Image (cartoon, grey):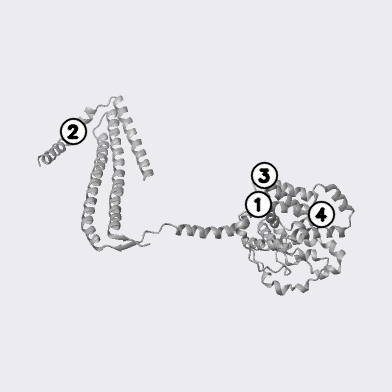
Amino acid sequence: MKTIWKVVGLIGLAVLTLGAVCIVVGLITGGSVERISDTLFANYDVQYYISLGKQIISTIMSM
Amino acid sequence: MTHINKQRFLTELSKFLTFLSDDEREQVLMKFGEIFDAAPSSDELMAALVSPLKVTVELSRAYSKGGIQSALERAVEMSGVELSAQPAAESASDEASPAAEGDEPAPEQESEEAPEPPAEEPDTEAFADAVGFESPARPDFPAAQPPEEAPPSPAAAETDTQPEDIYDSIGSAVEAAFENGTDAASAPDVTPAAKPEPAAEETAEPPAKSESAPKPAAEKYVSVPVPASAPPVSDEPEQDFEDEELEEAPEKALKPAARSKAKPRARTKAKAKPAPKPLGKVKPFMLVLFIIIFVPLGLAGIAVLLAVTAVILTAMISAGGSGVFAVSLAFSGMTLFADIIMTIGMALVCFAFAVVLLWLAVWFAIWSIGGLVRGIIRLGRKWCYKEAAE
């Protein structure tokens, strides 16, 4: 179990580090989170899912 | 011939001396080298030493009693060669007649071996067992050699050294094993013809015997069968050879014995595992109560733990799905490389979380649900069964 934890942790850490490096490099080279979110909202109907989630949460809270 | 004998003897002896350290082995081999150099006749020396195996036995005894010095002294004793008086001995041997040469080592050997045979016989058998050697002539001892057939004669030296024949044959068996892959040319020597001549013939012609004495000695060294004139095995209980000396004996010779010994030990070790505690008498009321209470509780607990596992798995699926979604987004609507690489970075972060959460869910399920079930079973044993009477 410990060995597997080590292996999984190592893999997770490596991928996380790689992702973080990618994000930092993207930010350095002129990337913009705002532009990415605009693209996301433009290509996918994310607003629908957000409102759906809000409804579910309010229903649960009202119970 | 002398050189070959010396070389072979030292080689085999070095193989047997595994109970010594490297330095000590070197010392012993050097000592034997000196002995061989100082010996007037190598054949006589070989007759006195009999075989590397016997020398090993004697050396191991001496070594266990008094260390390396004692072993070296014993080596010199066994050889019957006086190392300090080498030049004089050489000149004397040059001047002496061949008959005198032939007769010299026999009494010495006899005087050395005389007090030991009772102790050596069991050793011999133990070694014979250790090397997996079976003496074909052993069951026939009484019939083959009745006591009255061996009249006292000058050739008694040879008949008195009969215990050595067993060593000889054991040594030869080991030697034959060594030679199998290396020295096929010496195979013809390993024949029953190497048996010593009958004592009657030797008494009839003492001078001829003294001349031919070294030859049988050299042949004795490579003879395989145990002569029928070997001494009867004593009925005394065998001394515990294995415990005392078998551990010191050569590794090669002891390999089969060691294997046969080690296996049962391993088996007993495996059997020595703590047996599961026997269940005592069941308490029916407690058992029913336990089943009524703990089975539903256990099931509820398992359900809760499964729910927690499911939540972790959901988080994992979400993270993984987000990663896949991010990758697809990066290659679908992005125009700038910086945005693409940032999105891929986010996807990688999501994948990293997904991997960790996946293993977390598996580990949690195994650890928590398994632990809960084991705990319930242990509690049930404790509550529902009386302790077994010892």
- Residue B91 image point, x, y percent: 87, 50
Chain letter for the residue marked with disc 3 in the picture: B
Q: CA distance from mark 3 to mark 2?
A: 84 Å
Which of B142 and B99 lies nearest the eye of the viewer?
B142
Q: Earlier in the sequence, mark 4 or mark 3?
A: 3
The tag on residue B23 is: 3
- Residue B333 image point, x, y percent: 23, 33
**Both labels 1 and 2 in a single chain:** no
**Both labels 4 and 2 in a single chain:** no
- In this view, the mark in front (1 or 4): 1
Q: The C terminus of chain B appears in which quarter of the rendering?
A: bottom left
Discs 1, 3 touching: Cβ within 8 Å: no
Q: CA distance from mark 1 to mark 2?
A: 90 Å
Q: CA distance from mark 1 to mark 3?
A: 16 Å
**Both labels 3 and 2 in a single chain:** no
Reading the image, the residue beneath label 4 is B41
- In this view, the mark in front (4 or 2): 4
Reading the image, the residue beneath label 2 is A41
Q: CA distance from mark 4 to mark 2?
A: 107 Å
Q: Earlier in the sequence, mark 1 or mark 4?
A: 4
Q: In this picture, is B344 found above or below B145?
A: above
In this image, A41 relative to B28: left or right?
left
Q: The N terminus of chain B appears in which quarter of the rendering?
A: bottom right
Q: Earlier in the sequence, mark 1 or mark 3?
A: 3
Discs 4, 2 touching: Cβ within 8 Å: no
In this image, B206 relative to B291: left or right?
right
The tag on residue B64 is: 1
- In this view, the mark in front (1 or 2): 1
